[in-house]
Image: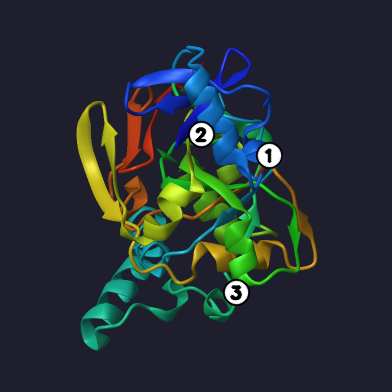
Amino acid sequence: MQLGRQGGRIVVMDEPRRRWVVVRDADDLPSLLGREDWRGLVERSLADGVLGEAPDGLPFAPQSLRAFALWEAHMVNGARGMVRRFAPPALRRLAGAYERATGRVLPPLRPKSNYRKYPQFYVGNHRSLVPDGATVRWPAFSGVLDFELEIGVVIGRPVRDCTAEEGRRAIAGLCIVNDWSARDTQWDDTRNGTFGGVVKAKTFAGAMSAVVVSADEILPRWQSLRGRAAVNGEVWCEGATAGPTFDLGEAVAYAAMGETLLPGDLLSTGTLPGCCGLEIGRFIAPGDTVRLEIDGLGSLTNTVSQRGA
């Protein structure tokens, strides 16, 4: 089911009639979807048929944000893109010569050893998430801005020190997330910063779709979805969710290792391979409009402001 918020109320898509209906007696979307009897509650509201309007704004107020990197192909090709765009010529030549001679990626461009031991993540800024349709302010400290097409994983019930299966059952729904990235800042912090390249490069803005799709519809097929990104109406890149290093249940279990996840906590999967400007060597400009889509999850559109706006 597709759900969201409109005018302070939760609404659900009535698929047969293609209309939005108000969900009664519920005011928090993650907690609603985390209930064992949530579908019965929603079905009764559909039967009542109190009409609502299409969702707008954030579907809920995220309580935290943990950003994962579930596809190694994105990690490797993103590192290649960083070298192509920002590295000194000598390093670019070295990386190219190594690949031509060995057929392998230069070792520093591959994820570190823990990448395959645990699902790696960083803690992002949940307060910087903006909704579908909002303008993203171009950060004054950056000259190279980029989009990243990701899936958002909504936690619907408390979980701590759990198994992967228990982690999977804690997932209430999924949505689309754009992990906006300041690439020049990321390059500088990766090489010179104390805490690596995911500090100011990532915390200034993120975006989340207005619609959350219930987990029962998406989880069984989440590794067979396709997505794409269009800039000013032109499709720049497409990708798929196949072949993650870890399943979503494993990601939740690692996030909950030694700490408690609660309804409203948000996890993002990391970028679908090929679905950011860094990987394709093409970057947006001030004033551009970026539309992200994932089949089965909907879309997310944001316009970037002019610099200094």
Task: Look at 71% across and 40% down and name the residue there.
Answer: 63
Rendering quarter of residue 229: top left
The image position of residue 196, as x and y in percent, is: 62, 59
- Residue under label 1: 31
Marks 3 and 1 close (CB-CB < 8 Å): no
Q: For this rendering, which residue is in front, 64 or 15?
A: 15
- Residue under label 3: 118
- Can you say whether 97 is above or below 155 in the image? below
Instruction: Give the side of residue 72 with respect to residue 250, left or right.
Output: left
Task: Look at 68% across and 30% down and name the residue there.
Answer: 28
- Can you say whether 78 is above or below 230 in the image? below
Q: Amino acid under label 1?
A: Ser
Say what secondary structure mark 3 lies in.
Answer: loop
Task: Look at 66% across and 44% down and name the residue there.
Answer: 35
Say what secondary structure mark 1 lies in.
Answer: helix
Instruction: Give the side of residue 38 with respect to residue 50, left or right.
Output: right
Q: Amino acid under label 2?
A: Ala
Which residue is farthest bottom?
102
Q: Amino acid under label 3?
A: Tyr
Return the disc, 1 or 2, that comes first in the chain's sequence: 1
The image position of residue 1, as x and y in percent, is: 44, 37
Q: CA distance from mark 3 to mark 1?
A: 28 Å
- Can you say whether 114 is above or below 38 in the image? below
Badge nearest the viewer, 3 or 1: 1
